[in-house]
Image (cartoon, rainbow, N blue to C red):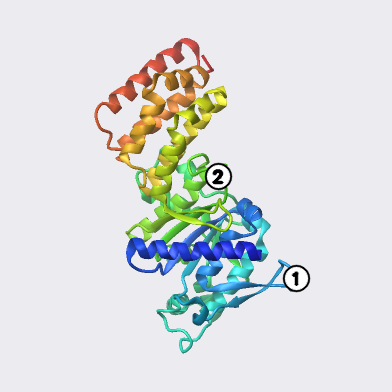
Amino acid sequence: MPTPTAYAMGAAAAERVIERHLQDHGEMPGAVGLSVWGTSTMRTGGEDVAQAFALLGVRPKWADGSARVIDIEVLPMAIRNRPRVDVTLRVSGFFRDAFPNVIDLFDTAVRAVAAISEADEPDDVNPIRARVQREAAEARAAGRSEDDAQRQATWRVFGPRPGGYGVGVQEVLNSGRWQDGTDIAQAYLQAGAFAYGQGGHGAAARQPFEQRLARLDAVLHNQDNREHDVLDAADHAQFQGGMAAAVQHLAGAPAALYHGDFSVPGSPRIRTLREEVARVVRARAVNPKWLDGVRRHGYKGASEIATTVDNLFAYGATTGVVGDHQYALVADAYLHDDATREFLQQHNPLALRGIGERLLDAMQRGLWQAPGDHRERIEHHLLALERRLEEHGEGPL
């Protein structure tokens, strides 16, 4: 991996990310962060990693008559016609376990790009080499050996500790014991500050991880199918939201946040994360047809509604991309609508309580500047629910 087909898709997506960043910010991104999962890699043949290779200005070499990757090719400026983009990968634990060869291949690509001479590519064309040289010099000045300093400066693949899994963000959000984005960022950094590549498999690398994230201009996350969306599973907000919170904490300014829609083969679409969340809220979360469908599934359907609110809250807490009107739409559709509220109360009253508490928490933390009497109405619904729970217990009513 990546396969030739996956590389074509990833290369197209790389150019569209650059185009969108140019459109939004007037300049190319110099450095981007990308989350990579094992399950999507298996489905697509490695489109996410292919996008990372293409941004670096590198492509795989395949064996004749085969999709087996045998090496990498560093593309010259004449072929790329643009500067290279520095890419940092945050991989899942499953990706780490399933694709160590792909990790090593990407690591080889980064180090090959960093080794290009300034005579061949000046710093404005090859920012990877410039950053590696600067950070290696800082590491040597701090007492590290030449080899160790170079290795520290070239780490670009990070993930959980060996044998570990997860991002650490959901646990913090669920606990309620967090004050602001700094707490979320610290959880993300602690869970993912282990470097992977040749010469190290899970090396503790908190400082290099922070150095890479502090310089990110954009944070990307891709999705390869239409069966799921950014609000139906916690991992989307954990990975992209966690990285976004870490960049905000380390750099003192937000990175651009982009969502890659790879669901149509050969035609990737890039939206801002704000656009994607807004699209999913309208298209699914508050869509009467979707709500009619989940009502047919009783307890499980109610749980899906609550999960949607949890994930919307997670994006609000980690990225700030959720608008006041989107919280209001959800409150209107789930709590203030009599039919939906009664459905939740009958089939899964704890889901109803969780939705109300999440929305109140969003108000209390300043994530939602709720207009009108939203707070009073939600508190009223929760109080009425508590009375019924005292009478009937926590099971379906």
- For the residues labelled 2 and 1, the Cα–Cα distance comes to 32 Å
Report which quarter residue 329 is drawn in.
top left
User: 235 above or below 254?
Assistant: above
- Which residue is labeled 1 in the image? 65
x and y percent of residue 221 in the render? 49, 54
- Residue 2 appearing in the image: no
- Amino acid residing under circle 2: Arg
The local crowd at label 1, few if under 14, some if 14 to 19, many if 20 or more residues have their Cα within 10 Å, is few
383 to 251, vertically: above or below: above
Q: Is residue 281 left or right of residue 201?
A: left
Rendering coords of residue 247 (x, y %): 39, 58
Q: Secondary structure at mark 1?
A: loop
Disc 1 residue type?
A: Gly
* Residue under the image location 54 percent in, 61 percent down: 158
Is label 2 in a helix, a strand or a loop? loop
Does 192 sit left or right of 6 as displayed? left
Image-quadrant location for residue 101: bottom right
Which residue position is annotated with label 2?
226
The numbered mark at residue 263 is none
Which quarter shows the N terminus?
bottom right
Identified at 41% across, 69% down, the residue is 30
Residue pictured at 61% horizontal, 61% vertical: 6
Residue 380 x %, y %: 33, 19
Whichever of callouts 2 and 1 sits on the residue coming sooner in the sequence is 1
Name the residue: 48% across, 29% down.
289
- Horizontally, residue 307 falls left or right of residue 332, namely right
Residue lying furthest right in this view?
Answer: 65
Above or below for 106 versus 278: below
